Amino acid sequence: MDLTRRIFLMSAIAGAALPARAAQAVTRIAGPAFGSSWHAVLPGGIDAITAQRALMEEIAAVDTAMSPYRADSHLTRFNRSRDTGWQQVAPMLAHTLSVALDITRLSGGAFDPTVGPLVRRYGFGPIAGPGAGNPAGLQTRPYAIRKAAPDLTIDLCGIAKGYGLDRMVAALTTLGHTDFLIELGGEIACRGHHPEGRDWLVAVEAPGGSAAQRVLKPSGMALATSGHAANGFPRLGLSHVIDPRTTGPAAPSLASVSVLAETAERADALATALLVLGSEAGPELARAKGINALFLAVKGPAFQEIMTGAFARHIVR
């Protein structure tokens, strides 16, 4: 989804959902991030330059730690190393890998931080290596990680963006901001209220268009959506999302999955895992674990909504 459409879904639709009030000044700042972009909305009159600088510093730090496209990143150095002993890395890399491995266990392997070489096999990523991965071969400490085999690699593209969004939220909070919304590559986190005094409202996009499938109040939670439509080879029925269990593109029984969670990091990884699990196992796991999710299941030319956890409580329309 391009930036203009994301702003429309976050702002124009949300603004129309409540009675009009006197317009209040807002500050909008934006920038590039992870091959995509970010956009933030804050009250007017803030120090926008300081806020933007703080957010860009967080993006740069995450990119330096976890980008698979940078030869100098901590992740790339680890992937290229043949050392099977403990290797010191940026604490944020060790933390994010630890969370990724938790989601791996929770999802029964539907989310796998060693899937990089399989993703590359289908033309969607830069991480080279042997075919199947082995998440059980990874261990983490607060400042270090290790692998059981020299050619084992890690790919955190399914979770790093969410972690980056959490860092951006923390950065604005540290600066003293209490009311803001940040969108990063389609993922959203907000705190407090809109400058007009109302709740923040955001939209989940309907598959294949700029219309809103649902408008909801995140209520301080992070929202992440994973789907098959954005990338891949849809005419061939091939998704860019790889199922580590089958070592091939995930079956497109779901058009998308949106997850509300306490952190964007967790929402990001869970959305991918549930999408891979599909229209039956995905909702089943979400119900069992109390995950707040909206599934759009493919039913012929239409889509069937399946909501789990407390997702329905956040729906405005």
Image (cartoon, grey):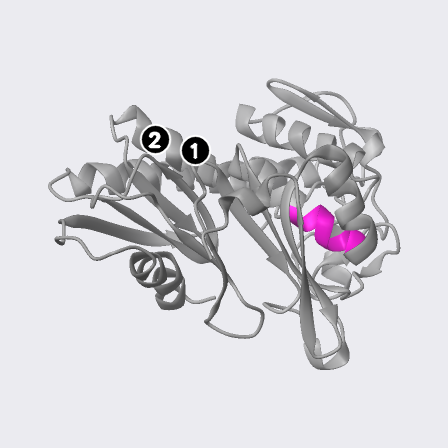
Task: Say what amino acid the circle numbered 1 marks.
Answer: Arg
- Location of mark 2 (residue): 171
- Asked whether residue 150 is in view, the answer is yes
Provide the secondary structure element on which disc 2 rests.
helix
Name the spot of residue 313 as percent of width and height, x first: 53, 42
* Residue 88 relative to residue 275: left or right: left
Residue occupying image coordinates x 83% and y 44%: 133
Q: Which mark is residue 234?
A: none
Is residue 188 covered in magenta? Answer: no
Magenta segment: 271-278
Q: Is residue 275 magenta?
A: yes
- Which image quadrant is residue 236 in? bottom right
Residue 201: x, y in percent?
A: 38, 50
The total number of labels drawn is: 2
| Residue 89 occupies quadrant | top right
Give the residue at x 66% y 58%.
125
Of residues 140 and 159, which is closer to you in this image? 159
Is residue 64 among the parts visible in the rendering? no
Determine whether 122 is above or below 208 in the image: above
Find numbered disc 1 in the image and state the secondary structure of the residue it sits on. Answer: helix
At label 2, the amino acid type is: Ala
* Residue sitting farthest toward the top: 142
Q: Are marks 1 and 2 in contact (CB under 8 Å)?
A: yes
Q: Is residue 148 above or below residue 206?
A: above
- Residue closer to the observer: 312 or 32: 312
Q: Position of residue 247 (x, y in %)?
A: 85, 56
Q: Which residue is mark 1?
A: 167
The residue under the point 50% across, 50% down is 315
**Depth order, front residue of 87/242:** 242
Closest to the observer: 132 or 187? 187
Residue lying farthest to the bottom in this orientation: 235
